[in-house]
Amino acid sequence: MLNIIFCVFVIVVILQLVYYLGVFGKFSFAKPQVITPKRLSVSVIVCAKNDAEKIRELVPVLLSQNYPNFELVLIDNASSDETLDIFEEFEKLHNNIRLVKVENNEAFWGNKKYALTLGIKAASKDYLVFTDADCYPTSPDWITNMTSQFTLNKTIILGYSAYEKQAKSFLNKIIRYDAVLRATQQFAWAKIGRPFTGNGRNLAYKKDEFFKRNGYINHMNILTGEDALFINDAAGKKNTAICYTPESFTYSKAKKTFKSWAKEKRKAAFTASFFKPFDRLQLKLFIISQAAFFILMIVLIAAQFNWMFLVPVIIIRYIGGWITMAQSAVRLNEKDVVYWYPVMEIIVIFTQLYVYSANLTSKPVHWK
């Protein structure tokens, strides 16, 4: 019986190495990215709802971008605080600001997809770059770097959105490691030619892409996943590129508690349940193989299986995973998170299992 369990364990390890080295390695071991600046007309789009404090800081950062031809489309999504007032103040002072005021609509109340649709329609430029009210680019060359990846064929650009580092917070390291893992998955599958999602905190695409697919029409009734689901619909091998230069990153504050982080992950998992079948399969297979690795390893160690066979398999798997994630972390300026890689991995895996089981027992309907 133990021999059969060990054989299954070896198969699981091989599957894990295929993911880490064969798939994720496409991004992890890629060469540093070199950009060729373009001079495209760009609309930077920000949608905000009750984010007065954040947008007061964000708008000046966006306006200071070192880019010759861009407008800033500010969408107030029926805020009840001072967000609209602040937007109007900026609009009076800057010619390149276009303000979109969204009023509550009975059919689309509180739906960010509706607000974004109005903002995209109002944008006057052909190329759109997106970020959120709760994050910011750290470089004045953010637009330059994101738009540098556009070509005649590449009309969707996936960027990296990181979290700020917080000193003496192990949860912060876990959240940042999870962000590195998710970005590695997104970028690697995109390089293979199977892009499956994007992050609205740092995303760009040509306006035509939105209208060719009738915007968010395929998932307008789902109150989450506006960017993730749109990219899952629209992105493909021929039209999608990635941008991972340090100057292209955006940053936001990480959650302060495990409960709030788990809620965020539940939201992401719920959104992923509407992905295309292949994308759902590859995501679930990775999580299952990770969990199976630890469970079978514990069983074999507890049963005192022959260490001469068991230990080398465990070491090979850890070397493959550690090196791959370390390379990704270096690419994404997050190398401190991989020092604790074995611990981080276990926590993230079993958090994901909790998330899946929680979503099975209580289907989320409204997310705030």
Image (spheres, rainbow, N blue to C red):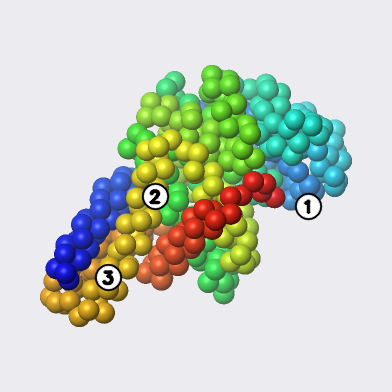
Q: Earlier in the sequence, mark 3 or mark 1?
A: 1
Residue 291 shows up from this direction: yes
Residue type highlighted by circle 1: Glu
Q: Earlier in the sequence, mark 2 or mark 1?
A: 1
Q: Which residue is mark 2?
A: 284
Question: In the drawing, does residue 227 fall left or right of residue 101?
Answer: left
Instruction: Give neighbour class at mark 3: few <14, some 14-19, many 20+ (Cα, 10 Å).
Output: many
User: Would you say the residues marked 3 and 2 are in contact, meaning their CB atoms lie under 8 Å apart?
Assistant: no
Q: Earlier in the sequence, mark 3 or mark 2?
A: 2
> Which numbered disc, 2 or 1, marks the residue closer to the eye?
2
Question: In the drawing, does residue 58 fall left or right of residue 229?
Answer: right
Q: Nearer the viewer, residue 186 or 367?
A: 367
Occupied quadrant, residue 70: top right
Image position of 318 with respect to 23: above or below: below
Q: Position of residue 245 (x, y in %)?
A: 46, 45
Q: Which residue is mark 3?
A: 297
Q: CA distance from mark 3 to mark 1?
A: 49 Å
Q: Which residue is mark 1?
A: 53
Instruction: Tell me what residue is drawn at x 85 percent, y 33 percent.
Output: 92
Callout 2 secondary element: helix
Q: Position of residue 11 (x, y in %)?
A: 20, 57
> Which numbered disc, 3 or 1, marks the residue closer to the eye?
3
